[in-house]
Image: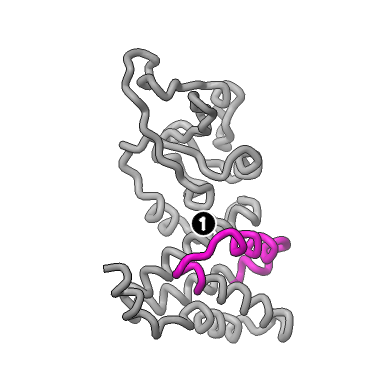
Amino acid sequence: MPENGKPTGDQSKARLKIGQAGDGKGKTRVRLRPVALGNIPWGIEAPVDLYINKGKELSLLFKKNQGLSSEAYSEISKVTDRPYYDKEADVNWQTLVENNFSAILDSSLPTEGKAAVAYGSAARQTQQIFSEFNEAGYETANMTVGAINKLMDEPGAIESFFQLTIHDYYTYTHSVHVYIYSSMLTREIIGDENEGFLKDLGVGFLLHDIGKKRHFSRDTQ
């Protein structure tokens, strides 16, 4: 297995029958659950085996404890946007991404991959902020906007964010969309040199619907 964590030729050929246990014996059914590429903590060790679903067979992408190579993202994204793992596995993808968020955005992950991770993280954090807004939530919004604003400076980032927004529209991602589109427009008008001003505006864009907090809370009860 290479040190960079890329799936090897032998691994990509590995197969697991969906109607069999991992050792190929018996008839234990493998129950699958998808995880979006943007919800994977690229750069750390895989917490579980990850597969590509091919009909009645699974192709092994990463073995448990193998490094989730950032360089493998582009190759995998050409085949699927969501690998699968055993539904019975105890893994919290959201926590893993949040704990490694800065490292992921500073890694060699392609810009479109970073955008997907940042977008998903921003949507989840916005949902939490709307559920219980406090000083900690405001600081979270500041950190999220700061990280995404920095990412927007990378070539191709704005195009990647735009592609994400046109395929996703829910209550909380709406706030992320407003932030992204408004930030794009602001940068076009005034440029991107005043980092502090852009960050303050970004937090305002992201939290523009915070006055509806009580309404959203009732809807989710």
Question: Is 112 placed left or right of 168 in the picture?
Answer: right
Q: Amino acid at mark 1?
A: Ala
Identify the magenta region: 149-175
Quick check: is 14 in the magenta stretch? no
Q: Secondary structure at mark 1?
A: helix
Residue 131 lies in what quarter of the image?
Answer: bottom left
Query: Percent x, y for residue 126?
Result: 43, 70
Q: Residue at x 45, y 41 (%)?
A: 45
Q: Residue furthest left?
A: 221
Instruction: Please name the residue that numbered disc 1 is placed on.
Output: 103
The N terminus: image quadrant: top right
Which is nearer the eye, 26 or 196?
Answer: 26
Q: Residue furthest front?
A: 219
Query: Percent x, y for residue 179?
Result: 56, 76
- Color theme of the render: one colour
Predominant SS along the magenta part: helix
Residue 22 lies in what quarter of the image?
Answer: top left
Q: Residue at x 56, y 41 (%)?
A: 69
